[in-house]
Image (cartoon, rainbow, N blue to C red):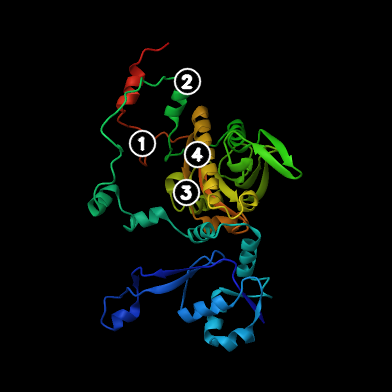
Amino acid sequence: MLLRRCAQLFVELDQEPRFEFMTLLNGGDGIDRSARWRALAPHLCEPVTITLAQMAALEACDREQPKPLDELIAAHAESDVTALLEAGLLLAESGGDSDRFRRDATLREVAWWPPAAIAQAHGGWDGIDIQARNEVGLMLSTEQMVEAFGTPPQHEYRRGTETVALPPPQLRAFDELLARRKTCRNFDGEAAVNAADLATMLHRVWGAIGTLELAPGAIAVKKNSPAGGGLHAVEAYVLVQRAEGLTPGLYHYLALEHALEPMQTLASEEAARLAHRFVAGQHWFANVPVMVIMTARFDRLFWKYRRHTKAWRVVHLDVGHLSQTMYLSAADLGLGAFVTAAINDREIEPALKLTPMQEGAIAIVGFGARAATTTTLELDDLVPTAASQAARAAPKD
């Protein structure tokens, strides 16, 4: 058998307290505070505890040139080599059908900056239900956070004592639109998005306006929001619960054609359960009529920004720009809207049949009619700032 080391690997000295049953049996408090070496590899979803001897075996095995198993065992304990192979830090050259092998192969093909790959792979959620955690007291309220951690850093941030007064801002129609832009946490559970509003939202936010061929096969795309390198490496997957003319289910939006690709038809109950899982149990978002999962096509982004230290940030900026355009468009159409990055991305990937580390979920937005009553807090009753009051009081042209 030929073995090679995985494509990317980080090792950290971890001393976070953790529960250990054996310490209770030995008369301790059940908490292990000893230091341990942890290997983090982006083709694995969880860290692996390793020994110094196993680290030496990893160092002896190249990530490109495979080494015979017998040769590795001759220099290192067979138990260490076997443990590394079982953990997935060493990979058999013939393991092409395994999920670990495929993920590692993707990392070799897509030019990730290694620290960003670790963050993407190990920062995902699976099975998180925020509301359920609230109900059993695992989430702190704002009052409890203040009591536990003290007051937060002040909301008004000053660097000195001197100020230069500015004239009141001018209020125009755009300011009225901005004032209507807010997060909705109470959607009408019966209302559907009409076909015209759905088409308008999708085209305004994710639709392409034009393209430009920069070199043979290298196409820049223009949309209503900016994107790093003109690549627009963000895709829109639409989870429909209630939309005029569409069956509940999963769709992929084609930005250049302004069309939907049906991916999976769902019963209404199935769509509702999927939405609830996608937004990690945030029930105030889960009943939205139309939900859009924004994913990053890392292969397209990193084609240009190869192993770039800033590229992973760029795709998150892209998603932020698209979210704001979505908010403003929804406000213009009189719809409620939200964005959240608190998502079960590890459940989303298989549901959308994404290739991990080649394409991944970044955030979810949604839009639809607001509910007539408020059951979850909305930031509506705000105290206006002095600047906003001055703007309203300023004489108009």
Residue identified by numbered label 3: 341
Separation of residues labelled 1 and 4 (CA atoms): 23 Å
Corner quadrant of residue 256: top right
Label 4, label 3: how far apart the Cα atoms are: 25 Å
For the residues labelled 1 and 3, the Cα–Cα distance comes to 19 Å
> Where 380 sits versus 236, above or below?
above
Cα separation between marks 2 and 3: 30 Å
- Give the residue type that dot 2 points to: Ala
Q: Which residue is mark 1?
A: 379
> In the rendered structure, which amino acid carries the disc numbered 3?
Ala
Quadrant for residue 373, please give it.
Answer: top left
Q: Are marks 1 and 4 in contact (CB under 8 Å)?
A: no
Residues at circles 2 and 3 in contact by the CB criterion of under 8 Å: no
What residue do we see at 34% from left, 78% from top? 21
Residue at 67 percent of width and 37 percent of height: 258
Residue at the spot of label 4: 190
Quarter of the image containing the C terminus? top left
Describe residue 205's horizontal placement relative to residue 154 as left or right: right
Q: Earlier in the sequence, mark 1 or mark 3?
A: 3
Which three-letter amino acid code belongs to the residue tagged 4? Answer: Glu
